[in-house]
Image (tube, rainbow, N blue to C red):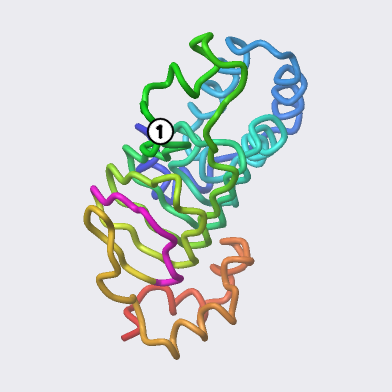
Amino acid sequence: MKGWMKVASKTVCLKFREHEWFGKTCLALYKIKSRYLRKIIRIILLSQAGAEVYSVVLREIFEKHHQVKLGLYSYGILSVNIPPGTIVGRYTSVAGGLLVINGSHPTKRKSSHPFFFNPGFGYVDKLLIERRSKLIIGNDVYIGLNVTIMPSVTVIGDGAVIAAGSVVVKDVPPYAVVGGNPAKILRYRFTLEIIEKIQASKWWEKNIEELKADKKEFAGFLKDLQ
């Protein structure tokens, strides 16, 4: 994450190149089921300026081996502990300190202690609570600093904004701005008419080079809509 701000510069964007031989080597080595080796490979890949934003190899590794699907140009996810089953769209920005809670201690039983639900302690034979099975974070979502996403959340819609320090306890609609503990809808980014037009356009399906090539369309990203 230390170098992600450098990615915003034109120089880094133009210089990032993912060499085919390097990518194939990383993918081949990652098949070896060594936690230490895999960690080293991730560190090497992420150390390249711009890799978290542009790297196709990183995305293939996380999808195949960690069941985390990350859309192109999205960043901030691969440097935190994200549970399997997570899907993140394209052009999504995640600031530091994101915490995704995978499951909660039971509160309706005699005890909430993990002795009585977590087999890792050796007192029960299997996990006796439900863990998160999926989390879908849409396209062009912005998640601020130190946000916590609770197990009850399964979907954060396209274009949503999560204010810094929020504790998200329920699904977030597209283009909603939420904040607080528990997080509540503060407002929507645009009118319903504009939201529907943006969603219908599905602009995030285009690569940044395509958007940049169309001067009129690219200019639409550089000014307020309302």
User: Residue 104 versus residue 206: which sits nearer the camera?
Assistant: 104
Query: Where residue 110 sits in the image (x, y, percent)?
Result: 37, 29
Q: Where 183 falls versus 16 (above or below)?
A: below
The majority secondary structure of the magenta stretch comes to: loop
Instruction: Look at 47% across and 55% down and name the residue there.
Output: 92
Quadrant in which the N terminus is drawn: top left
The three-letter amino acid code for the residue at tag 1 is Arg
In this picture, residue 152 sits left or right of residue 165: right
Q: Is residue 167 magenta?
A: yes
Tell whether 57 sits left or right of 152. Answer: right
Tell me what residue is drawn at x 25 percent, y 70 percent: 186
Q: Position of residue 210 (x, y in %)?
A: 62, 67
Q: Observer-nearest residue: 143 or 5? A: 143
Decide if residue 178 is on the left or right side of residue 26.
left
Residue 109 drawn at (x, y percent):
40, 33
Q: Which residue is mark 1?
A: 109
In magenta, the rendered stretch is 165-175
Q: Is residue 80 left or right of residue 18?
A: left
State whether residue 158 is above or below residue 2: below
Question: Quarter of the image holding residue 99?
Answer: top left
Pick the front one: 138 or 56: 138
Q: Quadrant of the C terminus?
A: bottom left
Q: Residue at x 26, y 55 (%)?
A: 182
Image quadrant in which you'd find residue 113: top left
Total marks drawn?
Answer: 1
